[in-house]
């Protein structure tokens, strides 16, 4: 493949912002990083602003995008919100899910996201009958990511019960394979592709019986695949787990071989000190989703304590109340300020690492998330001349990006060395707002 050179007006190189950086790209990877490249080399693609590694959205439920705005009417809790979510899930088909996910993933690309972890549990027809292709829904998501130009880790999710000892409800039948063994047989038919990785997920300890947790964990371990799990998002789940098993969800996962360096707990909101020690000591990751956690009134998770204990942090937009990884990054810091009434728990560089390198690692893309030779050529450029970002010195670009910029300030997104977003316009999905409007309208009937 032809060599392409990108000239970055300013580049975040993991610890600092460097002006005038040239990246040589071939076959979808960075081959050379040259600093002090002034002026731009002849023929180079010029990216004005601050270029950072592509952002990794480590936790997504693509169909939740159809709930934006709808669930802001009236009051309630996570559990009343869930009723709205089930109604949308009931209307999905492989075709409608592809159309919606394609538009949602295009929205992500416009926000600088180059890889998504799709926590996928809508597997079958509404009555629980498998499609002729038992992975029709998952394949629709993989195709949608390709069409939108971003990478995907399909975190195929085991979801077998409504609660401890309870069969799936009518709304949940299409989520369930019946047993973890049947789940493993189905997901084993899925294959990695150039832009796609197949991972595993346990929906939650209430949705997978304790005796079957190890089946999912062993499937992921045998393939060295990422394994994600919703963990202690709600106090009601903790209380039910204690009543059923006499322990916390984190302890139940640990006792069944789920925790470890390829595992990521999502939310990790309501943890005991012992839970934090279990997660950190096993280097189990933590994916925080602050915009969803506050939208659903879940609470503020102990992210700082988890990281101190040894749990790597990543970020996700989860329910897509907004799709903005820069907002997720600063929200984690600002939430901790509200909790502690002190400032400065993470530097901008540390927050960017959670949004890039550590997020990609949690999704099974360890060769992404860095601007260095040999890494995947996935990066995004934040404009430094908008009403939100103008003014600060360029050397403070990381601070400006994390604490002032929004997804609206993303100027370019490059995946595998090709422009997916150029000058704020998606190159593959011509009209993303219309695509979103049409896909959501089709679901609402």
Image (cartoon, rainbow, N blue to C red):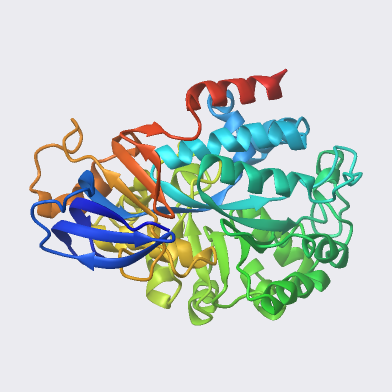
Q: Residue 225, how many percent across, how many down?
A: 63, 70
In the rendered image, the residue lying farthest to the front is 2
- Is 252 on the left or on the right of 163, as rendered? left
Q: Residue at x 71, y 73 (%)?
A: 217
Q: Residue 331, how many percent across, how many down?
A: 35, 48
The answer to whether residue 80 is visible is no
Asked if residue 48 is positioned above or below residue 244 in the image, the reply reads above
Asked if residue 98 is positioned above or below residue 261 in the image, the reply reads above
380 or 428, nearer to the observer: 428
Q: Residue at x 26, y 51 (%)?
A: 51
The quadrant in which residue 438 appears is top right
Q: How many marks?
A: 0
The quadrant in which residue 198 appears is bottom right
- Is 90 on the left or on the right of 4, as rendered? right
- Is 175 on the left or on the right of 27, as rendered? right
Q: Residue 381, how many percent across, how many down?
A: 28, 46
Q: Residue at x 64, y 32 (%)?
A: 99
């Amino acid at each position: 493949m032809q060599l392409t050179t990108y000239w970055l007006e300013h580049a975040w190189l993991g610890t600092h912002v460097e002006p005038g950086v040239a990246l040589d790209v071939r076959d979808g990877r960075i081959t050379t990083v040259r600093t002090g490249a002034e002026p731009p080399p002849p023929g180079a693609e010029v990216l004005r602003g601050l270029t950072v590694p592509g952002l990794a959205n480590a936790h997504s439920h693509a169909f939740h995008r159809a709930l934006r705005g709808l669930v802001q009417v009236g009051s309630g809790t996570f559990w009343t919100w869930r009723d709205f979510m089930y109604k949308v899930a009931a209307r999905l088909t492989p075709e409608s899910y592809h159309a919606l996910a394609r538009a949602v993933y295009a929205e992500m690309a416009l926000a600088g996201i180059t890889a998504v972890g799709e926590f996928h549990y809508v597997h079958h027809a509404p009555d629980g009958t498998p499609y002729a292709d038992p992975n029709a829904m998952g394949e629709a998501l993989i195709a949608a990511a390709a069409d939108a130009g971003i990478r995907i880790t399909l975190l195929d999710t085991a979801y077998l019960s409504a609660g401890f000892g309870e069969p799936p409800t009518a709304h949940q039948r299409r989520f369930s394979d019946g047993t973890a063994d049947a789940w493993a047989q189905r997901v084993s038919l899925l294959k990695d592709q150039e832009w796609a990785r197949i991972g595993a997920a346990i929906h939650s300890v209430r949705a997978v019986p304790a005796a079957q947790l190890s089946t999912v964990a062993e499937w992921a371990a045998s393939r060295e695949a990422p394994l994600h799990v919703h963990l202690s998002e709600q106090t009601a789940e903790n209380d039910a787990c204690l009543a059923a098993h006499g322990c916390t969800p984190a302890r139940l996962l640990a006792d069944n071989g789920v925790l470890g360096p390829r595992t990521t707990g999502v939310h990790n909101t309501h943890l005991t000190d012992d839970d934090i020690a279990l997660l950190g000591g096993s280097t189990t990751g933590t994916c925080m989703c602050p915009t969803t956690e506050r939208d659903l009134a879940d609470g503020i998770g102990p992210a700082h304590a988890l990281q101190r204990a040894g749990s790597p942090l990543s970020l996700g937009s989860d329910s897509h109340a907004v799709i903005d990884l820069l907002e997720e990054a600063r929200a984690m810091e600002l939430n901790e300020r509200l909790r502690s009434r002190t400032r400065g728990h993470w530097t901008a560089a540390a927050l960017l690492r959670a949004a890039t390198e550590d997020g990609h690692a949690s999704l099974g893309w360890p060769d992404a998330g860095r601007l260095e030779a040999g890494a995947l050529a996935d990066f995004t450029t934040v404009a430094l001349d908008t009403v939100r970002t103008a003014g600060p010195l360029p050397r403070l670009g990381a601070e400006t990006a994390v604490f002032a910029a929004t997804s609206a300030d993303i100027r370019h997104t490059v995946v595998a060395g090709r422009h997916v977003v150029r000058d704020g316009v998606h190159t593959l999905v011509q009209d993303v707002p219309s695509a979103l409007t049409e896909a959501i309208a089709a679901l609402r009937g």
